[in-house]
Amino acid sequence: MMWDRARTLDRRMRRKTLDVGLLWPVLITQAVLTLPWLWRTAPFTDEALYLRAGHQVWAHWLHNAPLPAYADYFSGAPVFYPPLGAALDSAGGLAAARGLSLVLMLGSTVLVYLAASRLFGRRAAFFASALFAVCGLAVHNGAFAAFNPLALFLLAVGAWAAANAGDEGYRWIAVCAAALALANVAKYATLAWDPLVIGIVALHGWGKGVADALGRGFSLAATVAVLDAGLLLLGGAQYVTGVRITTVFRTLHFGEYQSPAVIAWRAFVMTGALVLPALLGVIVSVARRESLPVIALIALLAAGGLIAPVDQAHLGQIGALDKNLCFGLPFVAVAAGYTISVIIDWAEHRLPAGRFTGIAAGGALILLVLISGRVVPVQFRGQGIAVASRIVSAVRTGYRRGTYILTDGGGRVEQYYLPAIPDANWLQVFNNPSPALLTRIKSRLCGGHVSVVILKMVQGSYYRKYDYQILNVIAGMRHRLAVTTGQGGHNTQVWQLASPGGDRSCP
């Protein structure tokens, strides 16, 4: 009897060793793909904004400094990720803050493996984790110092806990609910994926009885709702405003309207190599005559990749598509892993060298996802370090203490590199400025109170219509063009005030 127990324990240890052995190549590949991006680019606008806000939150906590007013419009709680990212930024710079994201994304890969293994077995888990790890969006989120990696990791924790809840009781419901609530705090948009996790709990536990499965699903939904409501009340009115503006009643705030066809094509280019195999899994599960709950579960997982494109198409906005697409990746990767596993199983029994053929097909799909992720650039990557350095140097040289810096679209990256310049000295002009604001800007320009003007250009034209009005004003002033630099058709002009004082001939 003791010998039997020893053999059973030995088999379990070998199985765990095999699990680790399958994961290590995937994690190493993901790390190798991601590591160069920790240093390759200057911060993206969101990275600069959230890290700077995090430093200001620390200043508020430690020195009672005022909180940044713009944080009310963040798409995640300003007191959750930003201070964490800012602490690492202080310790090791932007690369350290991005390093946290790499750790979180590696953890997400592990959780995808564990969830898929629980739902569909280790073979499906290996392919699911490999597809997730090499996807371009996952790689770039691993070097993206913003809300998304933390929110994605917590969402993956919720999915893993949901996969365990069907078999191992209500304690996993508590873990799942806590993970989802924290994911919702980190990034409000993850609310849209909560129903998928609730569905996993209900459908995976369907075999134990309909009443029990529905009870678990309802228990999770109710617990998450209570936790979210409590955290929202704890945060106060500004958090309610943030959720309402950025998530629940979101409208087109920036950029031009894009047709649903344009948005659908962009989504297909970014994630089609994952979404299509996931959708194929629904057909395969029907052909295999899987039980209805299993078919519904695979369909639910595949639907995770469609939530962001449908939402962005409804808004007619493509600017946040890439960032929100990442939240569906764990779900579609698990469904795609199921598809590959089933095809290998089918080929094993019906084709000569079928096992090899099926594994080769799975490997080809991983390679396709890898190549597409390397070829298609994501929207949330900053400009090159050299470009950013030239812009920041021109701003630093031209700035005169006590004057203003007029920025087209926010100037968040410049603010990140120049934290000593007070927020009040940055005149930030966004879409559709009011006539009163334009008049005020013109008055300050004509009075010689603006020492630096930053204008953005795309394909040789100024990015916004009012830029031409600003250019007409500074053309008659003492401003001179200090630098024009950029990459990929996107350029930035920095104008410096050559000498102080106003100009009565200002147009």
Image (tube, grey):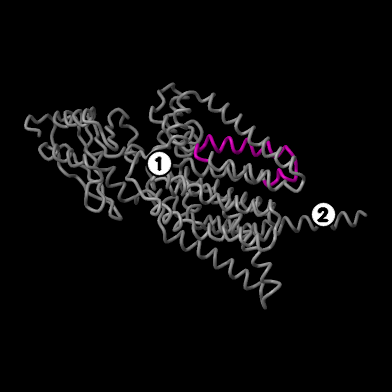
Quadrant into which the N terminus falls: bottom right
Is residue 232 inside the magenta stretch?
no
Q: Is residue 505 left or right of residue 316?
A: left
Q: Which mark is residue 9?
A: 2
**Element type where label 2 sits in the image:** helix
Residue at horizontal 64 percent and vertical 32 percent from the top: 223
Residue at horizontal 75 percent and vertical 43 percent from the top: 168
Residue that label 1 marks: 46
Q: Which residues are magenta?
A: 163-190
Type of residue at label 2? Leu
Residue 507 position by quadrant: top left
Whole-angstrom CA distance, mark 2 to mark 1, is: 49 Å
Earlier along the polypeptide chain: callout 2 or callout 1?
Answer: 2
Residue 163 against residue 86 in the figure, above or below: below
**Element type where label 1 sits in the image:** helix
In percent of width and height, residue 387 lies at 30, 50
Residue at horizontal 27 percent and vertical 47 percent from the top: 390
Q: Is residue 163 left or right of residue 423?
A: right
Task: Tell which of 60 and 275 is nearer to you.
Answer: 275
In percent of width and height, residue 257 lies at 34, 46
> As drawn, which residue projects farthest toward the bottom?
352
In percent of width and height, residue 215 lies at 71, 37
Which SS type dominates the magenta stretch? helix
